[in-house]
Amino acid sequence: MNKLSLLTNGIIKENPVLILLLGTCPTLAVTTSAVNGLGMGVSTMAVLISSNIVIALLKNIIPDKVRIPSFIVVIAGFVTIVGLLLQAYAPEINEALGLFIPLIVVNCIILGRAEMFASKNKVADAAFDGIGMGLGFTFALFLMGSIRELVGSGAWMGIKLTAELFDPISVFMLAPGAFFTYGCLVALINYLSQGKAIKKTEFGCANCASAASCQLAGKGGCE
């Protein structure tokens, strides 16, 4: 796969939020404004790119039996760095995102790309994959944050735009508004692609990338 395909794959064809339906927890929780969505997306993208590069560099050194814990350690290191940088240079964003910055460690998008792509490809390809997936994640969060902020408060990026034209629908700034906005976006993509865009994945040990080395697989499934 060429570098351009790696970039566009994460943004369009396999957008982690709108197509693969991953990372929904931070997507729903922090997108009360466009700025918050952008901040979370950029923070996650920085961790994703950095961890992909390091894991691709160490893929032949990390023992297979401890690769997942090793990936988590690498990811946690970069999350700590990003958290400290936000505290120092963007304290308002850091306060708004709160607990969801350290929770980037367990973001399934990052660990998934580490396991499925970075650990099996060259450093350059892993970096471009991280950039593409990161941009796709950032775009999805920014889009959701923009819609919720505009409809819910009549503003965008903190600038009042439509508050004088119609009464804002405050429910969009709450949890139900997040679910409704996300559902509408996914439904729109599904409609425009005639049901072909959304990845339909069967869950279970048979489709798990770690099934071969998982002790639970021999017991007939996860408990």
Image (cartoon, rainbow, N blue to C red):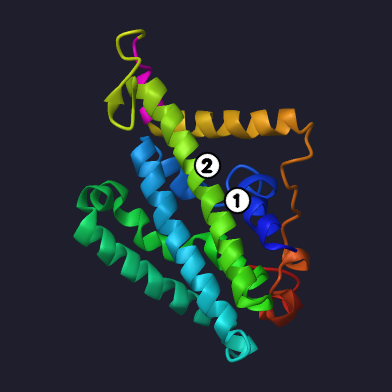
Q: Mark 1 Cα within 10 Å, few/some/many (few <14, many 20+)?
A: many
Q: Is residue 29 magenta?
A: no
Question: What residue span does the magenta drawing correspond to?
Answer: 167-173
Residue 142 falls in which quadrant of the image? top left
Vertical side of 89 occupied by 222: above or below: below
Q: CA distance from mark 2 to mark 1?
A: 9 Å
Please indicate whether residue 74 sits to the left or right of residue 7 in the image: left
What's under tag 2, amino acid-wise?
Ala
* Sequence-earlier tag: 2 or 1: 1
Residue 145 screen position, x and y as percent: 42, 35
Residue 157 falls in which quadrant of the image? top left
Query: Mark 2 sits on what residue?
Result: 140
Q: Are marks 2 and 1 in contact (CB under 8 Å)?
A: yes
Residue 85 screen position, x and y as percent: 27, 63
Work out which quarter of the rendered image holds the C terminus and state it. bottom right
Residue at 58 percent of width and 51 percent of height: 22
> Which disc number belongs to residue 194?
none
| Residue 19 in view, yes or no | yes
Q: Is residue 172 magenta?
A: yes
Residue at 71 percent of width and 33 percent of height: 190
Indicate the secondary structure of the residue bearing disc 1: loop
Query: Mark 1 sits on what residue?
Result: 16
Residue 55 falls in which quadrant of the image? bottom right
Vertical side of 17 occupied by 107: above or below: below
Residue at 76 percent of width and 71 percent of height: 220
Residue 74 screen position, x and y as percent: 46, 77
